[in-house]
Image: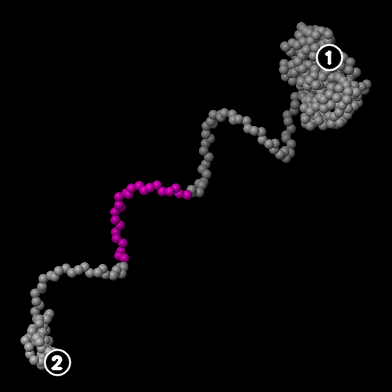
Amino acid sequence: MRQALSSTTTHAPRVTVALAGGLALLLHAGCQQSTAGEPGAMGNMGTEGARGPTGDKGDKGDKGDKGESGTPGPMGVMGAPGAKGDKGDKGDQGLQGPAGVQGSQGPPGIQGPTGATGATGATGATGLQGPKGDPGSPGAPGAPGSSGAYTEDGAAFVGFTTTTYTGLIPNGRPGAHAACAAAFAGSHLCHVAEYALANSPIDPPATGAWLDPSAEFDSSTSYNGSPQAGRAPNGYSCLSFGHSGNTYGGTSVGASGSMGWTTDCDKAKSLACCSTPAKTRFAGFTSKTSTGKLGGRAKAHALCNSEFSGAHYCHAAEYLRANSSTTIPASGAWIDPSGNNSGVVYVGLPTLGRQTGGYTCLTYTHDGNTYGGTSLNSRGGIGWTTDCDKSKPLACCY
């Protein structure tokens, strides 16, 4: 479209200016502007001119503001698995899980070899006494005669030792009992009445065999087979088997079976051994010693019971019937005398009992040497001496 401009001023040389879109502007140089006229009618659109050459690239513009996030598109198809990656580093150890249910017990393994015996441990402290248990079931009946007897009705002979001895036997009468027990378990040296009552069919050795003499109720020596006789511990036994000369008599059984005494304690002979059971048993000698001043007989019984539970202080007859092989201390040991209706006796008759009067250090209240006390000597002899001032252990029996 082209527009014509008109002016009412003085004309100067005209200048024509081409405008985009085919418009031309006519200017008069050096003219003063006059009042604009009415616009003319729009002319026809001219034809488009040829395109000019491309201009140089302009400078890069500033970065625009970030646009708003678009709506997520749909998930694409899963791709093929990638190649296996390298092994990762070992992770930290996890917390311990709860214990599983216990499995069933496996079969027993083969027993291993016995290990070496370990060293003995120190003795532990004594524990408190537990409550009394229920009574046990009755035991099997004992062998006949195992309860013992008070007489020699159950006399039993077992044999003669092959070892021979003079009248001097180590430890005296207890040593003779021990020698028989070593040759025949459970046996002891016979006394005359015991051997005779056993009715032995075994021939005695040609040299004879030693045994103890027996005694009657009045304590006189006896060589008879009376069930009421008992062991005589003093005379005619080579001084309680403490002498090997020919100045003391010893009792023996000869090859023919006769019994008596002869002064041949220097001759070696076998021992006649019996196993007659007896009710009395010897418990032992107390470790505590005392003079004759014990404080009374009850104190003597209490001392025996404190060292040998259930024991009491022996008297002579029961000690002799116990046939003890326990070595007697060198100091000897206190013992009560036995007695019959006539007075004090020191033989092993089953009918004798404890004598409670004389020869007991005035019933164990005196420790001088003006009263007599009864004691065992180290060879097994029994008697009294005025030595209540001497300290000795006590003989204890069950």
Q: Is residue 10 left or right of residue 195?
A: left
Q: Compared with residue 130, is residue 171 higher up or lower down, i.e. above or below?
A: above
Label 2: which secondary element: loop
**Which residue does the image show at 79% across and 32% down from the upper left?**
306
Label 1: which secondary element: loop
Q: Is residue 89 left or right of residue 374?
A: left
Q: Compared with residue 288, is residue 134 higher up or lower down, i.e. above or below?
A: below
Mark 2 and mark 1 residues within 8 Å of each other at the beta carbon = no
Q: From mark 2 to mark 1, how far is it between C-alphas? A: 192 Å
- Residue range of the region highlighted in magenta in the rendering: 72-95
In the rendered image, residue 129, in percent from the top left (x then y), is placed at 72, 38
The answer to if 76 sits in the magenta stretch is yes
The quadrant of the image that shows the N terminus is bottom left
In the rendered image, residue 42, in percent from the top left (x then y), is placed at 12, 86
In the rendered image, residue 336, in percent from the top left (x then y), is placed at 86, 25
The answer to if 34 sits in the magenta stretch is no
Q: Is residue 192 left or right of residue 29?
A: right
